[in-house]
Amino acid sequence: MIPVAHPAPAEPAPATEQPVIGRARSTLLKRLSDLVCLPESRISPVERHMAGDLLMDMLREAEPVLRARCAKRVAALGDAPPLLLRMLAADEIDIAAPILEQSPSISDADLVAASQRGGAQHRVLIARRKHISEMLAEELTSHSEPEVAKALLRNDEARLSNKSLENLVELTRAHTGLCRSLLSRPELRPSQGLTLFWWANTDDRKRIFLRFSVDRVLMQESASDVFEMVAAENWQDPLARKAMQFIERRQRNRAAIAKSPYDSLEAAIDAGLIEMNAALAEEISYLSGIKPITGARILADTGGEPIAILCKATGLKRDYLAKLWTALKRNIGTEQAPDEAFERVRYTFDTMSSNKAQTVLRYWNWALSSSLSSDLRRRIRDGNMGDATELSAPERSAALVFGKQG
């Protein structure tokens, strides 16, 4: 048998070289970044923005490390393509950070977009920027984030609009530690300061009194001849009546005293030592020249400073502060060991002038009751306030003080 020769095994085909995917991409991204970062003397605005458009289109699907590298480069540019900045500012926080912290050319509109599309970390970095416009502050405070609020309040260059302040006041209700920072802002208005008083701590309450309790001397002088006009109209104009009740000097309600079963406010408090009930508390409110809903909020306050304001504003003597405190079943202590809370309240009574106490009491009464219509009561009860920007200052104060905490 003739042996058959087997063919030699074929040589293995040379392996096809695999292209290095990504090398061209990263090189092109770098070159486009170089073009975008050229000084104005070397590239026209049109070509810069065209390069920026190409760069942005590639970056959408590029690896995070490449986007981060590009963000660091364009963050320092004074004329970076706006769309590129807008995209990178809303990217992951590690990528967006250089843009949010450093970019001098990113617009407020793009920062607002980054705040809306990004997370709390984006908003904290934005809040730390050197200049914060009122529009941007409104966006930052609309998310009710305490860390963002803290950064914004520490930023002396931030401009806070009334809407921003309202958002911050509402946030302090759940995060009372922010009260101190908010009270340091010069933009804070009396309506806002005397509203957040109700949940502020003892030290912050002192700051509120120092800042917002005034004598109303100029108001009283400018409206001195209007009292006779309002009286001649028998106080029929509700708008004039509300305003004049805030301005006038006399605190106690003479008409209520004339109709009361008690001869005076003092007599009503003496009766409270025997038995304090809701009807008597309401009577004390009327005699003091305030609405029962305001009186109820004052008498129920756990800190007690509003009780000192009530007594001082109505001209009660020091011993009646102790009597009202006792009637409310609160401890006074002894001469040797006075109760700490009562001592704090008595200090408020001793250091506040009658006219300043009247200003605070009247403002509370105006803010908490003047606009508390049946419709507003229902909306507060249902927790459905609608668009808060449409509320007046007293309506918003009432909604915050009497509303449920979210």
Image (cartoon, rainbow, N blue to C red):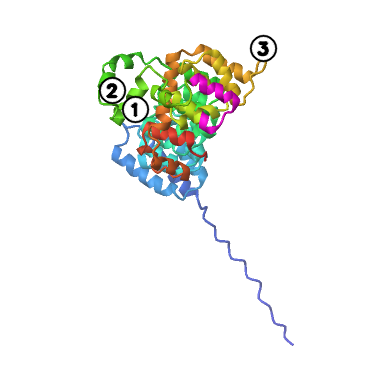
Pair 2/3: label in front: 2
Residue 15 visible? The answer is yes
Residue in the foreground of this view, choosing between 328 and 100: 328
Quadrant in which residue 384 is drawn? top left
Report x, y in % for residue 207: 50, 18
The numbered mark at residue 242 is 1
- Residue type indicated by callout 1: Lys
| Local secondary structure at mark 1 | helix
In magenta stretch: residue 274 = yes
Residue 214 sits above or below residue 383 on the image:
above
Residue 99 visible? The answer is no
| Earlier residue among tags 3 and 1 | 1
Q: Quick one: label 1, few (<14), some, or many (20+) residues within 10 Å?
A: some
- Residue type indicated by callout 2: Ala
Pair 2/1: label in front: 2
Give the spatial CA distance, label 2 vs label 3: 48 Å
| Earlier residue among tags 2 and 3 | 2
Quadrant in which residue 271 is drawn? top right
The numbered mark at residue 335 is 3
Image: magenta residue range: 265-280
Report x, y in % for residue 230: 27, 23
Q: Which residue is mark 2?
A: 231
Q: Quick one: label 3, few (<14), some, or many (20+) residues within 10 Å?
A: few
Which residue is drawn at the image coordinates 41% and 16% (left, top)? 214
- Residue type indicated by callout 3: Glu
